[in-house]
Amino acid sequence: MRAIKNKKTHSSAAGRIKVSKNGPYLVSGGLSLDKAIIVTGRNGIPDKWGKGEKFRVQEGYALCRCGYSTNKPYCTGMHAVKRFDGTETASRKKYLEQAESTRGPAITLTDAISFCAIARYCEKAGSVWTLAEKGDKKSVKLAIREACDCPAGRLVAWDKKTGKPIEPKLKKSISLIEDPSEGASGPIWVKGGVAIQSSDGYVYEKRNRVTLCRCGKSLNKPFCDGTHLTVEFNDGDRRLKK
Ligand code: FES
């Protein structure tokens, strides 16, 4: 048999997430995995992102999406025991088809509420929508920062001069969000335009920021809809009140 020449393979740089039917997220391509902490200011509103633990780099791994794993964040097969219903209910319309716009003198803010993971950075230094409508430099800067801090990509600021989105530089990777001030573990933050494929083979729109449900209770699967706060999902993180 002739040896197959080593053509360009889909290796680490590719990175991909496959949503398995009623089971875990199957991650491939050696995507790095760590924790990202929502750090609040004195007023209790999220102010910045803190860095948490880094997990061992693996070429492929399965992340729990049912919320019942006994070894979070990885899948332990509990989805089968619990008969997890992971039916994907999210709209397949593109982000801009779902988004509403707030137009200011310098930027336009687009907002697709279905992606909201309730990370609350949009209120950091005043409402992002109000700030976007203002034209002064300070307000514009704050609006851009708040939009860029939104992990779910619900909010995007667009430069009116260039017509281009203003996006944070994110490398292809995955972070598990922890929200200690709310006493809850948050969603899986997928960064840098990683391809996410549904259980029926559909490839969702590739985006720089998006959050996937990991409590198992979102009504907008596979995306997070903030339900982890209602159910006080806890992955055992030491920062959360027990
Ligand atoms: S998806 Fe397998 S244990 Fe949660």
Image (cartoon, rainbow, N blue to C red):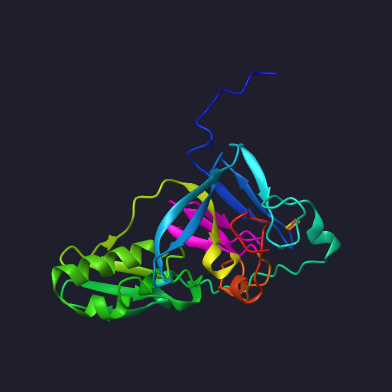
Answer left or right for 172 relative to 53. Answer: left
Q: In this rendering, is residue 226 above or below 25? A: below
Answer left or right for 130 relative to 224. Answer: left
Q: Quadrant of residue 177?
A: bottom right
- Kindly identify the residue that appears in the image at 52 percent across and 67 percent down: 181
Q: In this rendering, is residue 112 above or below 66? A: below
Total residue callouts: 0
The image quadrant in which ligand 1 is located: bottom right
Magenta stretch, residue numbers: 185-214
| Residue 160 visible in the picture | no
Residue 216's spot in the image, x, y percent? 68, 67
Placement of the C terminus among the 4 image quadrants: bottom right
- In depth, the one of 28 and 5 nearer the eye is 28
- Kindly identify the residue that appears in the image at 78 percent across and 60 percent down: 79
Residue 75's spot in the image, x, y percent? 73, 52
Residue 198's spot in the image, x, y percent? 62, 61
- Kindly identify the residue that appears in the image at 60 percent across and 37 percent down: 56
Whether residue 71 appears in magenta in the rendering, the answer is no
Q: In this rendering, is residue 115 above or below 25? A: below
Residue 65's spot in the image, x, y percent? 68, 60
Placement of the N terminus among the 4 image quadrants: top right
Q: Quadrant of residue 98?
A: bottom left
Whether residue 205 appears in magenta in the rendering, the answer is yes
- In depth, the one of 60 and 228 nearer the eye is 228
- In depth, the one of 143 and 153 nearer the eye is 143
| Residue 197 visible in the picture | yes
What residue occupies the far top of the structure in this picture? Answer: 2
- Kindly identify the residue that appears in the image at 56 percent across and 48 percent down: 16
What residue occupies the far right of the structure in this picture? Answer: 81
